[in-house]
Image (spheres, helix red, strand yellow):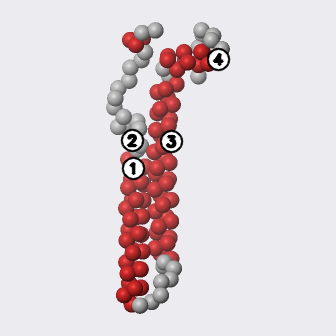
Amino acid sequence: MTWEALPTYSADFSSNMGGSMITNGFVVIGILSLFHAAYSAAQHRSYLRLVGIEESALPIDITIQALLSMMITMYGRSEMGSETVEYLKQRFFSTRLYQKKVAVIEGGRHQARAV
């Protein structure tokens, strides 16, 4: 088998591996919101020290914002991951080289089965 016999692929990963615009938006919005929650928590601690109040739990709105931001970021990232996995699976399993490896693993048979 020569290298010329293998299928060629373009190096354009922008449409296949980057995720859609919506999932990228979820990740960006989630991270920005998480940074805002962290900044709000730091401001709240600073305010408590300035007033002289003993430190207590964070206000519920900051806690909710942090949790929702983390969930939005994780959702967006998991959706990006599933698109990437599907693309790589499609690209890897369709090559003749993979089919040849499957034939070798199955006991040296020379006929590769389709996966």
What's the amino acid at mark 1? Answer: Asn
Q: Which mark is residue 106?
A: 4
What's the amino acid at mark 2? Answer: Gly
What's the amino acid at mark 4? Answer: Glu
Left or right: 71, with 51 as reference point: right
Relative height, residue 3 to residue 89 (above, below): above
- Do the numbered discs 2 and 3 sit on residues whose CB atoms are within 8 Å? no
Q: Residue at x 40, y 44 (%)?
A: 20
Q: Which residue is mark 2?
A: 18
Tell me the distance, in whole angstroms, between the alpha carbons under discs 1 and 2. Answer: 8 Å
Q: Which mark is residue 115?
A: none
Q: Of circles 3 and 4, which is in front?
A: 4
The location of residue 66, given as percent across then percent down, is: 47, 67
Determine the secondary structure under disc 2: loop
The location of residue 46, given as percent across then percent down, is: 38, 81
Q: Which residue is mark 3?
A: 82
Left or right: 84, with 112 as reference point: left
Tell me the distance, in whole angstroms, between the alpha carbons under discs 4 and 1. Answer: 41 Å
What's the amino acid at mark 3? Answer: Ser
Q: Which residue is mark 1?
A: 24
Relative height, residue 108 to residue 29 (above, below): above
Q: Residue at x 50, y 83 (%)?
A: 56
Tell me the distance, in whole angstroms, between the alpha carbons under discs 3 and 4. Answer: 29 Å
Tell me the distance, in whole angstroms, between the alpha carbons under discs 2 and 4. Answer: 35 Å
> Circle 4: is it few (<14), some (14-19), or many (20+) Cα within 10 Å?
few
> Circle 3: is it few (<14), some (14-19), or many (20+) Cα within 10 Å?
few
- Could you tell which of marks 2 and 4 lies nearer the N-terminus? 2
The location of residue 57, given as percent across then percent down, is: 51, 79
Q: Quadrant of the C terminus?
A: top right
Q: Residue at x 37, y 62 (%)?
A: 32
Q: Of circles 4 and 1, which is in front?
A: 4
- Do the numbered discs 1 and 2 sit on residues whose CB atoms are within 8 Å? yes
